[in-house]
Amino acid sequence: MAQIIVVTSGKGGVGKTTTSASIAVGLAERGFKTVVIDFDIGLRNLDLIMGCERRVIYDFVNVIRAEASLNQALIRDKHVTNLYILPASQTRDKDALTVEGVGAVLDELRKTFDYIVCDSPAGIERGATLAMYFADHAVVVTNPEVSSVRDSDRMLGLLSSKTKRAEEGREPITEHLLLTRYCPKRVAKGDMLSIGDVNEILAIPLLGVIPESTAVLRASNSGDPVILDKESDAGQAYSDAILRFLGQDIPFRFTEEKAHWLKRLFSMKEREAV
Amino acid sequence: MSATSLVVNRHTSFQFKTSFAPCTIMQISRYDLDVLPRELMDIISRAPNFFLGAPIVIDLEKVNTLGEIDFVRLKAILVAQNLVPMGVRNGSPEQLEAAASQGLPALSIGKLSADTPKKKIEKSATRLVTSPIRSGMQVYAKEGDLVVTAPVSAGAELLSDGHIHVYGPLRGRAMAGVQGNRNARIFCRTLEAELISIAGYYLTKEDMQPMPESHGMIQVYLDDKQLRIETIS
């Protein structure tokens, strides 16, 4: 049975699309047949992050309106096998999405895919509510900063009340927290909320902590999801998050400030002295 | 004698078990054994399966001032219709004694008398919430109290016509006695609320004195026109 994952946040610019792309690639790398859908109708971005913008012919709205078949609209990813992208329409607006239309497309995808990743737009309007409506899992992307945390809290409220599972009184959506743009140095200085601070307010299981990294911007501009950059800290942190999602117990990395080499040298000397 | 001595041990040949078997109460409103067989037959013919072998308790409440009742004949009429008379209730002491001598013991099952109605409370007016109340959510306990056992986030709103009890962190707004109940109170463990209000009188976070870390509960109540915040130790 296919699992539907929504990547959501409420706030814009926190890394939803980057996360959707990396989660989709990560799941496909581990052999799961995966499709990632861009729900941000009118502000299409996922195709750029996935590097397939030149191959978009039909889109999600075309499929909903039966102007194209699903197979015509699905784009095969160039990085990994087992991965497909369903791009958003750039010329329409979010009212083009309907519950019935989205439900029908997801039902069709469920037949052949293991994971369906829904990249939610920012806000709490139609696009965002429809992206989460059918979900089984929610990855709530949050920056360690008060306004992002409050927006995520609001999304968690909607996830527990305005989704199909909630309406049907079934088992609630599985919630995962993904903390992005985390900077241990600024946390140590008190400029940024710590993992503990965020957890105290949101109180849901932590899926991953992605460090602030130059690799993310580089990956976006080149159209290669950052999880493919195996050398980078952000890429490794996303890989860890995928393994945790699949049930493995992986220790958290990149959450402590790296001590300067001189400092480390001194602390070694101190230890010797004792 | 201790209570445990009532428990039958595993070596006995029987066990006592509590059970609630359905039982039909036949309330006699007019004592007329001449018309009873025909009336009974008429009713039973409409639902023969329901009445077949049904245990019957005869209620004498409406006829317990009449005096003597012919239990031999009454019992025979019921048995003739394939009913199983179990006993009688609500009769006069003389009636109950006469019935007992015919193998119909006095029972006190079901409702004892129309004079002592026991009102069953199906639903309490208190509203209980056990899952987190997130930013943007609003919970209103109409005509009752509100009890929350989970965190209440900043930007969430609690409203109650009665008291509000919060056992998780309270970071949102809490408004008790919103219909004007000045005796309503707010009980919480930490004072991090954005706003607290009782019967329209309110304090914002800015107006609240920081409370020392306490292990007890905090209560908020209305003293004339001023909200008071106290710890309960």
Image (tube, coloured by chain):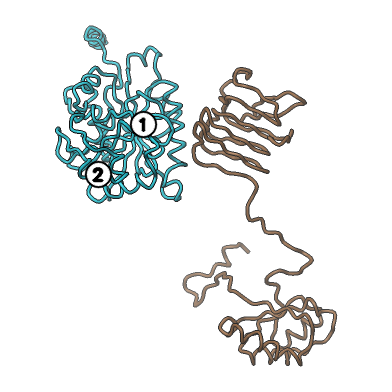
Chain colours: A cyan, B brown
Identify residue type, mark 1: Pro
Tell me the chain of label 1: A
Q: Specify the subunit that label 2 lies on.
A: A
Q: Secondary structure at mark 1?
A: loop
Q: Earlier in the sequence, mark 2 or mark 1?
A: 2
Q: Position of residue A180 (x, y in %)?
A: 32, 24
| Quadrant location, the C terminus of chain A | top left
Q: Which residue is mark 1?
A: A121
- When the figure is inspected, residue A12 is found, relative to residue B90, above or below; the finding is above
Q: Amino acid at mark 2?
A: Ala
Q: Are marks 2 and 1 in contact (CB under 8 Å)?
A: no
Could you say which quadrant of the image residue B95 lies in? bottom right
Give percent across and percent down for residue B136: 51, 32
Q: Residue at x 37, y 23 (%)?
A: A143
Q: Which mark is residue A68?
A: 2
Query: Up-down: is B170 above or below B78?
Result: above
Q: Nearer the viewer, residue A232 or B83?
A: A232
Image quarter of residue A203: top left
Residue closest to the eye, A212 or B17: A212
Q: Horizontal and vertical percent for residue A40?
A: 34, 32
What is the secondary structure assignment of the residue under circle 2? loop
Q: Is residue B19 left or right of residue A161?
A: right
Q: Nearer the viewer, residue B162 or B65?
A: B162
Q: Residues within 10 Å of mark 2 (few under 14, many from 20)?
A: some
Would you say B21 lies left or right of A231 here? right
